[in-house]
Image (tube, rainbow, N blue to C red):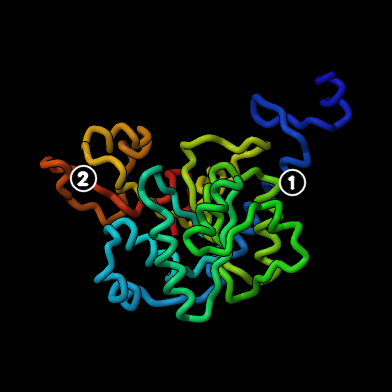
Amino acid sequence: MGDAAIADGRLTRANTRYTTPTAVSHKRAILNLERDARRAVQPVMLPTEVEARLATTHLNAAQKRAVVAIVDAVDGVIGVQGLAGTDKTTMLASVRALAEERGYTIKAIAPYGAQVKNLQHEGFDGKTPMAFVKAKEKGIDDKTIVVLDEAGVMPTRLLERTLRMAHDAGARVVLVGDTGQTKAIEAGRPFAQLQRAGMATGALDEIIRQHDPTMHTARRPKRWRRSVTCENSRMTMRGGQRSRTTTWRCPPRNATTR
């Protein structure tokens, strides 16, 4: 059966694995949509303004840098790679507050119903990806920021449709998730592929839920513990011990540096 699918073109060899031409097409479309969105928008707010506004908040340094990176972005599609326990929702709530001051609206998308309910409980206009793409009225324009929560489990097919709809409406997209968590049920790992392709991506790795330094280290994937930082490394005290916290990292080594 597999040989027949290869022979008639329904399966295409990709390195040592096989994929469908349709899957390859979706992947290329996603990468092209992200690439076309680079340097395509103006910042919602300048860094100095954001930093002044956040100075009196309870956000930690990692969350503040993530907020700055999102509202100061000049790329229409960006990512935030966040470990579990870094309180991404609180960070996004600050993004929403600042964006709404400048006339922007936030549309939140999450893959599962429970996650959508959590976002709605925090005041976000939340939908599942399928509900979003099937809605007759998307309610998005060039003053909209579409936040894709748990982007690590977004399948290729749905992410392409979402990005295309945002692109056509002139909306910005922020993908928030963790490539180290559970993968998408459907085919594809587009969030990880976008990062490898050079999508502007920040990192939230200051874990809030654990207070034991050894637990913080254990929850970080090995690739994060070994990675080289661009900037913003600092020393913090955790449980009476000193540890290094890095909040904004370079793209992966094989990604385009911008």
Give the foreground label among 1 and 2.
Answer: 2
Q: Is residue 7 above or below residue 21?
A: above
The image shows residue 254 at horizontal and vertical percentages of: 47, 44
- Report the Cα–Cα distance between label 1 and label 2: 41 Å
Q: Is residue 38 above or below residue 20?
A: below
Q: At x 39% / y 64%, what residue is drawn?
A: 67
Crowd around label 2: few <14 · some 14–19 · many ≥20 (10 Å): few
Whether residue 221 appears in this view of the structure is yes
Q: From the viewer's perspective, is 244 left or right of 17?
A: left
Residue labelled with disc 2: 244
Q: At x 59% / y 65%, what residue is drawn?
A: 37
Depth order, front residue of 26/217 = 217
Q: From the viewer's perspective, is 2 left or right of 232?
A: right
Q: From the viewer's perspective, is 220 left or right of 3?
A: left
Q: From the viewer's perspective, is 203 left or right of 140?
A: left
As drawn, the label of residue 25 is: 1
Q: At x 49% / y 55%, what residue is drawn?
A: 79
If the image is split into quadrants, where does the N terminus sit?
A: top right
The image shows residue 228 at horizontal and vertical percentages of: 31, 44
Q: Is residue 168 above or below residue 126?
A: below
The image shows residue 236 at horizontal and vertical percentages of: 17, 49
**Element assignment for label 1:** helix
Residue type at mark 1? Answer: Ser
Depth order, front residue of 115/212 = 115
In the image, farthest residue toward the bottom: 102
The image shows residue 49 at horizontal and vertical percentages of: 33, 78
Residue type at mark 2? Answer: Arg
